[in-house]
């Protein structure tokens, strides 16, 4: 049997690539799993279970499973009819023993829960990079490293108060303010507000011409003025101009020396609803904080009702001023006596993380510019006091699995038996902060997205949920058929021919109340139109708790799932035909 396998391996490269180099079936890259990455021997977590950080998702009770056959047939072609290349010499390098070795380190107390931006997260990133070094993978990007730097920031209001005429206005009801377009202003006091039309200064229309607003608090309408025929005064057409962007008004008010500016929002409830996460969320956002906020006048959006309170008995004057603008395009400044006291104090923080990238270049000159991206997030929840959230299943299991898959592909590359297309193995950060690491890559890809054939995402594959407590040989498959029926067929065939797991599609249903399709890193690829599949073992009682530890992991299950992921990726990178996006999106 051994001689038969070797003869097949000798013939395949000749048939596929037209060369007769004999593939090596014994040469395997040495993987150093020393504690160069951690410097100290990892200790098993002994902390006791504590409270949850997030609520446990509810499990769907619907059954929608597919159990594949038990005997793997001898194959001659992939699902597209192209010549089959046997993955066996490489798929068998994915072992429970190696997975345990990786995970015991990554989910140790020394790595402190791997929260993005912390020492433990950097230790994990360095461990992954060292693994890629041991495999002989090239460094990528202009930085010639394995790291793609990712910046995150967070800003909000520590204190935001507005008092007018001794009445306290209500934030997120009477008014709101974006932290990103404001600077700290511990105290803004005034005894007068100046109505300035629409706050526009343009050659075709100006609210500022001949007026001095230095040191004043301004009141303006949002949007732009137009006449009865629907023609905008600035553009002199039916189309709006740059002045419909409120930031233009803020810049101009700042240049004119205004102390602050109120902008009347005629549909403030809708605006607040659309921007609620930005206004209230403390989650990290991608990129750098807006460094241009110093160019903006401090600004607050207010409701028409609050505007009436500020205007007081001058209301009729404001109505006449607006009618004059609409009729003649001429504006009038109106002074409004108002006792005003505003406090605007921001809270800001930032941190940096890294995606870790391992690249295996394809061996087929015609196909190597295309690639399959295999992802898992390596970050978790970190520490809370002395409690370490080790995150063995979430997602040390996926991280360890992907490291083993990288090694299997590196062996195939060394043996010149594939991959024909290139493989990008990417361990992403910031998933627990809102899928930020994968979002960053999808916005700033190292390799063109148009060349990305598919994404395979591995997130939590080391445990068994309650539904399958008597059958660990299962996996939930999410998203495979959302964009490409071929991706679904390839995964089904890979399972039938290699692993014989029960494939459960319960969480792939569009009406799944858990919405897992939208909750892991594959979604940022799918959103860009790239077919993506997500492998997931479901949740358990230790989900997002300090009790998610290594001793509860089923490494034999991980081995089987890792082999399925590799087999699916193997066809994606080695078949002749690139899979198509053939599912219409709603």
Image (cartoon, rainbow, N blue to C red):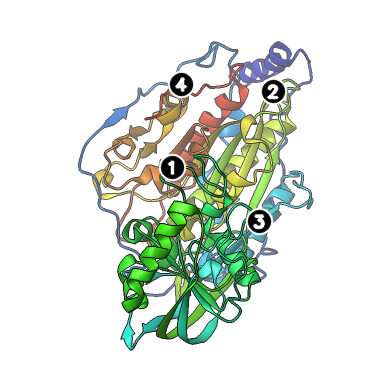
**Looking at the image, residue 232 lies above or below residue 125:** above
Which marked residue is nearer to the observer: mark 2 or mark 4? 4
Label 2 vs 4, first from the N-terminus: 2
Which marked residue is nearer to the observer: mark 3 or mark 1? 1
**Residue 219 vs residue 207: left or right?**
left
- Secondary structure under tag 4 reads loop
Which marked residue is nearer to the observer: mark 2 or mark 3? 2
The residue identified by callout 2 is 367
**Looking at the image, residue 511 lies above or below residue 334:** above
**Looking at the image, residue 383 lies above or below residue 92:** below
The residue identified by callout 4 is 582
**Looking at the image, residue 87 lies above or below residue 284:** above
Label 1 vs 4, first from the N-terminus: 1
- Secondary structure under tag 3 reads loop
- Distance of label 2 from label 3 (alpha carbons): 33 Å
Label 4 vs 3, first from the N-terminus: 3
Please rate how many residues cluster around mark 3, counting C-alpha atoms within 10 Å: few if below 14, some from 14 to 19, many from 20: some
The residue identified by callout 1 is 230
Q: Which disc is residue 33 wearing?
A: 3
**Residue 397 vs residue 105: left or right?**
left
* Quadrant of image for the C terminus: top left
- Secondary structure under tag 2 reads loop
* Quadrant of image for the N terminus: top right
Q: Is residue 127 visible?
A: yes
Residue furthest toward the left? 61
Please rate how many residues cluster around mark 2, counting C-alpha atoms within 10 Å: few if below 14, some from 14 to 19, many from 20: many
- Distance of label 2 from label 4 (alpha carbons): 21 Å
């Amino acid at each position: 049997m051994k001689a038969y396998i070797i003869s097949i391996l000798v013939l395949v490269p000749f048939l596929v690539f037209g060369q007769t180099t004999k593939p090596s079936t014994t040469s395997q890259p040495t993987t150093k799993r020393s504690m160069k990455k951690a410097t100290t021997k990892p200790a098993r977590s002994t902390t006791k279970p504590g409270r949850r950080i997030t609520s446990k998702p509810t499990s769907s009770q619907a059954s929608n499973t597919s159990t594949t056959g038990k005997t793997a047939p001898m194959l001659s072609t992939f699902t597209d009819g192209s010549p089959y290349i046997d993955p066996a010499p490489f798929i068998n390098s994915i072992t429970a023993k190696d997975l345990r070795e990786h995970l015991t380190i990554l989910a140790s107390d020394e790595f402190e829960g791997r929260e993005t931006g912390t020492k433990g997260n950097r230790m994990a990133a360095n461990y992954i990079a060292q693994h890629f070094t041991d495999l002989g993978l090239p460094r990528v990007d202009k930085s010639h490293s394995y790291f793609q730097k990712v910046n995150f920031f967070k800003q909000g209001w520590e204190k935001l108060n507005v008092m007018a005429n001794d009445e306290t206005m209500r934030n997120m009801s009477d008014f709101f303010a974006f932290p990103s377009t404001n600077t700290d202003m511990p105290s803004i006091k005034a005894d007068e507000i100046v109505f300035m039309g629409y706050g526009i200064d343009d050659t075709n229309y100006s609210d500022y011409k001949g007026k001095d607003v230095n040191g004043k608090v301004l009141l303006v309408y949002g949007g732009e003025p137009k006449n009865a025929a629907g023609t905008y005064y600035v553009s002199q057409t039916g189309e709006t101009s740059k002045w419909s962007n409120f930031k233009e008004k803020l810049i101009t008010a700042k240049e004119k020396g205004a102390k602050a500016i109120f902008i009347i929002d005629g549909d403030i409830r809708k605006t607040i609803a659309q921007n609620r996460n930005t206004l209230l969320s403390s989650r990290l956002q991608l990129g750098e904080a807006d460094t241009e906020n110093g160019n903006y006048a401090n600004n607050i959006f207010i409701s028409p009702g609050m505007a009436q309170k500020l205007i007081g008995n001058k209301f009729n004057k404001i109505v006449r001023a607006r009618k004059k603008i609409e009729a003649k395009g001429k504006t009038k400044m109106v002074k409004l006596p108002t006792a005003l006291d505003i406090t605007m104090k921001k809270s800001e923080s930032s941190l940096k993380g890294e995606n870790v990238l391992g690249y295996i270049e394809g061996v087929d000159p015609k196909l190597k510019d295309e690639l399959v991206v295999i992802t898992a997030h390596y970050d978790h929840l970190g520490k809370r006091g002395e409690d370490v959230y080790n995150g063995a299943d979430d997602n040390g299991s996926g991280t360890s699995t992907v490291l083993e898959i990288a090694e299997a592909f590196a062996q195939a590359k060394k043996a010149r038996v594939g991959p024909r297309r290139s493989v990008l193995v990417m361990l992403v950060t910031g998933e627990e902060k809102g899928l930020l690491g994968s979002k960053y890559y999808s916005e700033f890809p190292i390799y063109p997205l148009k060349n990305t054939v598919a994404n395979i995402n591995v997130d939590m594959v080391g445990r068994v949920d309650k539904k399958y407590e008597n059958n660990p040989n299962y996996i939930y498959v999410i998203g495979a058929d959302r964009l490409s029926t071929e991706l679904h067929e390839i995964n089904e065939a890979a399972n039938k021919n290699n692993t014989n797991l029960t494939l459960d599609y319960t969480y792939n249903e569009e009406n799944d109340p858990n919405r897992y399709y939208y909750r892991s890193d594959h979604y940022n690829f799918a959103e860009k139109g790239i077919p993506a599949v997500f492998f997931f073992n479901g949740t358990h009682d230790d989900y997002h708790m300090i009790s998610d530890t290594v001793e509860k992991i089923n490494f034999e299950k991980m081995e089987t799932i890792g082999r399925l992921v590799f087999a699916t990726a193997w066809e994606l990178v080695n078949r002749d035909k690139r899979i198509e996006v053939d599912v219409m999106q709603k």
